[in-house]
Amino acid sequence: MRATALRSTALALLLVSTALAAKQPGPDLGAKPPSPATVAAQTRVKATLPAEDGRDAEFAQRGFIATRSDPIIRDAKGKLVWNLDAYNWITGPAPATVNPSLWREVGILRHHGLFKVTDGVWQVRGFDASNMTILAGKTGWIIIDPLTTRETAAAALELVNQQLGARPVVAVIYSHSHADHFGGVRGIVSEADVKAGKVQIIAPAKFIEETASENVLAGGAMGRRANYQFGVFLQPGPQGQMGSGIGMGVAAGEITLIEPTDTVSKTGEARTVDGVTLEFQIVSGSEAPSELNVYIAAPRVFLSAEMSTCSLHNILTPRGAKVRDTHAWAGFLDEALQLYGSRSDAVISSHCWPRFGNGEVTGMLASQRDNYAFLHDQTVRRMNQGQTPAEIAEGLVQPPELAGQWFNHGYYGTYSHNSKAVYQFYLGWYDGNPANLNPWPPQDRAKRYVGALGGAKKVIALAKKAMAEGDYRWSSELLNHVVFADPANLEARALLADSYEQQGYQAESAIWRNQFLSAARDLRQSYKPGGGTNTQSQDLIAAVPTQLLMDSAATRYDPARLTWPRIDINIELTDRDEVVGIQAGKTVLIARVGQPVAKPAVVLKGPRRLILGLLFLKLPLAQLQAAGLKVEGDPDAIAALQAALDPVPAGFTIVEP
């Protein structure tokens, strides 16, 4: 499903030329209003929603102190990074283009600024997809989760210092290994102060390894899919992006990282940080493979990072990640209830708004525990009865006792895709039916389906009938086959975009909405590689262990392009006192840190940034030599290795071949 920029441009030209050659208007590629079926669906949803008691709206605005006078946050070059007022239009009743439950959720999430939780505890919310939590120590600030980017984090800390009095940051806590919880660290502290011992950085065990695994090894594919999940190319609006379900959009600034100076590995471990007693709960394997929660003893506040938020979360995110352990997740919530429930007067998280009062704390933890436990147990029960992932997803319905709480709704994760993730956790991708063991790939399958159904015109006619009846799931399946059989079929592309769009309008999950509407956008405009979300920042790559980076390079190695029988190379990283031995052969590339090869064809000596330029950016050897890279031996070996490495992925098509 990969496409080059040239191929995308050619397709775009073909779409235009086909319409011109026909000497008649092409299909309408603009956004469409809600269909009668969508209007009816929104009306049905509204009738099933819990009664509105105003608690969430009050909790979300309680303790408001101030926000930035200038809503626009820019980077050093003046580029827009974040607009605090991007969602100010969300007022009044929901339009028919937005699920009424999602409209309510985002209307509450959109509030931004500095909020007091209780004495000594504040949060900056709405400055990014995540929240920054601020604790007052004896001499400075303790920051939990410094947002996603340098720029938004700096703006958040500036607001804190303006409103509460300027103090140094003396400690940073990363709650887990996702970029929106560490990426802004260089906006609030310097690496020099960390190395000098002026700032400590605390994280859960295996934080760096899991960060590298997710954002470097699989970062190319995840970044492209994240553009769909978060609607990166969509404009906020009633027919566009409606946040992410647990936050707003994704900031466009620089993702940074400074390695932790201290790690926590066991639940119950405590630290006294600048006079503040903190107790940690390790919940790795729930929302992230490396994650902790923080109990702040004196003010009786429990920070449940992403284990409990204002929405059902993802067991497996649509952008892709390691599948999560739902059984363990429910267990961690029960453990938190037992350890901290009776000792807490507020529960806060790294997304969404707090809940205040001991009854609210215990009620939320217990209800969300039951939500994940029900999802897990009933999926496994059905699985053991022989039901397939699709059958389970279709039949598993959230009970009213759980659906009656707004925070259990699927604004982010859904019962549908989460039940499939539970199935995958235990049984993998295969549903046991041999018809699905070795199917044709999408394009070949599509051509066979379209041919079997009598050709594209007949399939399109069937799809139009389904759309007229409001059966957008079936129309999308039919039209998807036509588009994969013939991507230049303008009518099929336009209709498929319309079908996806109506499903986006109806979705309660913000990320389902984003994916449907992003797909419609790509079909109407033709995808062009580049831009969007990229978690593979230079700072992140520079911070991860060398062995993991070498392993990442191996995943881009195409042995069929190697013109030598074998290449042995030694690399001496002069700034890290590391030696890497590389063996590239006819099947694999193997790199070993600390184990040089015996008879290298060439030896490279230089700082790691130049080696990264060689292996990741594929910069010309002469350019790197001019920058200080030393080469001893046959430079043709380097050229041969570079030729066998794929470039760092820039993107690929999703809704067309």
Image (cartoon, rainbow, N blue to C red):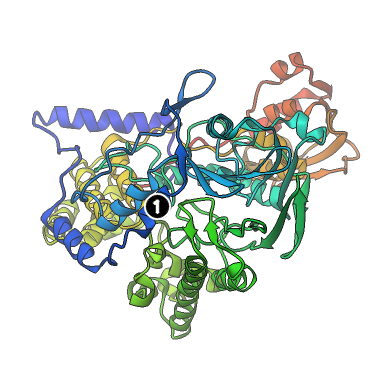
In the picture shown, does residue 91 fall above or below 58?
above
In the picture shown, does residue 264 fall above or below 424?
above
x then y, percent, for residue 250: 46, 40
Q: Quadrant of residue 591?
A: top right
The residue wearing badge 1 is: 245
- In front here: 229 or 76? 76
- In front here: 45 or 470? 45
Q: Quadrant of residue 378?
A: bottom left
- Left-right relation of 598 to 215: right
x then y, percent, for residue 72: 42, 27
Q: Quadrant of the C terminus?
A: top left
Judge whether residue 323 can be spotted in this image. yes
Name the residue at 41% across, 75% down. Answer: 388
| Residue, far right | 598
Total number of numbered labels? Answer: 1
In the picture shown, does residue 107 fall above or below 626?
below
x then y, percent, for residue 382: 43, 82
x then y, percent, for residue 376: 49, 75
| Residue, far bottom | 385
Q: Amino acid at mark 1?
A: Gly
Helix, strand or loop under label 1: loop
| Residue, far top | 626
- In front here: 522 or 242? 242
- Left-right relation of 370 to 215: left
Dot 1 alpha-carbon crowd within 10 angstroms: few under 14, some 14 to 19, many 20 or more:
many
Judge whether residue 563 can be spotted in this image. no
- Left-right relation of 289 to 406: right
Name the residue at 34% across, 71% down. Answer: 404
| Residue, far left | 24
